[in-house]
Image (cartoon, rainbow, N blue to C red):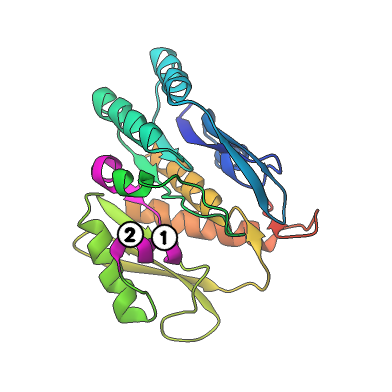
Amino acid sequence: MKTALTIAGSDPTCGAGVQLDIKVFQRIGVHGLSVITSITSQNTVAVKSVHPVDTGTVVEQIEVLLEDIGVDALKTGMLYSRSTVEAVSAVLKSRGLSNVVVDPVMVSSSGMPLVEEGAADRMTEVLFPLTTVVTPNIYEASLLSGINIEDADTLYEAARRIKSLGPQAVVITGGHFPAPDGGNTVVDLYYDGTEFHRFDSERIAGEYHGTGCAFTSALTAYLSLGVSAVEASRKAKEFVDSAVRRASHIGGGMGILGV
């Protein structure tokens, strides 16, 4: 059986983070492995606090898995600290791991910072060059590219700039952004340095927890199964769209995806 590893934070709602990643891996048919980088106190309304796991323990979790089990693909989510970004990157490089998906998590939907100062810059320097696909949302893409994304031209230019930071490909997810050419459409933009691919879906009313996590974990699972990066991105988009349509509202805030 193929394996997929998530290196990310814990979410007690199971609507995002490591818990959601494992559910997505299982749904797609790969065995999920997990390394927890932080423990959060959150619900469907807000993230109350973040408690990082020390870097040595994060590395130990990765190493003990790799000593015993092969990893066909992996994703990183919330790494939080500069030291964890550096340590995880060092392990990936020394082990020569491939099929690496990076979700450059920076801020929660409720506005809580999910990285310490300097961690995002270090991510672009040491982690992006090891990455198969990096998957920023519009807000993250704006920060990473230095471009205020407000139309199709700035969206495409942001993708070019993020690609220049070292990943093999970038997908800018558009769930938090109006379609660049209008209409009730969510546009994800894939760029591999040669070609752009645009993946469209109908925008579904409401706010939903964990869409970015679900997208990256689905993408990771498909990569582990040998699907190409562009097709894995397309299939991940379809997976999230289906999960949003099956979402339930078990709390007072955002909906929980139907994974």
Q: Are marks 1 and 2 in contact (CB under 8 Å)?
A: yes
Q: Residue at x 57, y 54 (%)?
A: 112
Q: Position of residue 94 (x, y in %)?
A: 25, 24
Task: Label 2, secondary structure: give it.
Answer: helix
Task: Please tell me which residue lies in front, 114 or 180.
Answer: 114
Q: Name the residue beneath numbered marker 2.
A: 144
Q: Residue at x 36, y 62 (%)?
A: 143
Q: From the viewer's perspective, is 254 left or right of 197?
A: right
Question: Image quadrant of residue 75?
Answer: top left
Q: What element does badge 1 sit on?
A: helix
How many numbered discs sit on the rendered protein?
A: 2
Viewer-proximal residue among 130 and 144: 144
The amino acid sitting under disc 1 is: Glu
Q: Position of residue 58 (x, y in %)?
A: 46, 25
Residues shaded magenta = 124-146
The Cα–Cα distance between marks 1 and 2, rounded to whole angstroms, is 6 Å
Q: Position of residue 117 (x, y in %)?
A: 40, 47
Q: Which residue is mark 1?
A: 140
Helix, strand or loop: magenta stretch = helix
The residue sitting at 39% across, 80% down in the picture is: 150
Q: Quadrant of residue 195?
A: bottom left
The x, y position of residue 235, in whole percent, is: 47, 55
Please give the name of the residue rendered at 19% of the width and 62% of the height, measured from the top-left corner. Answer: 194
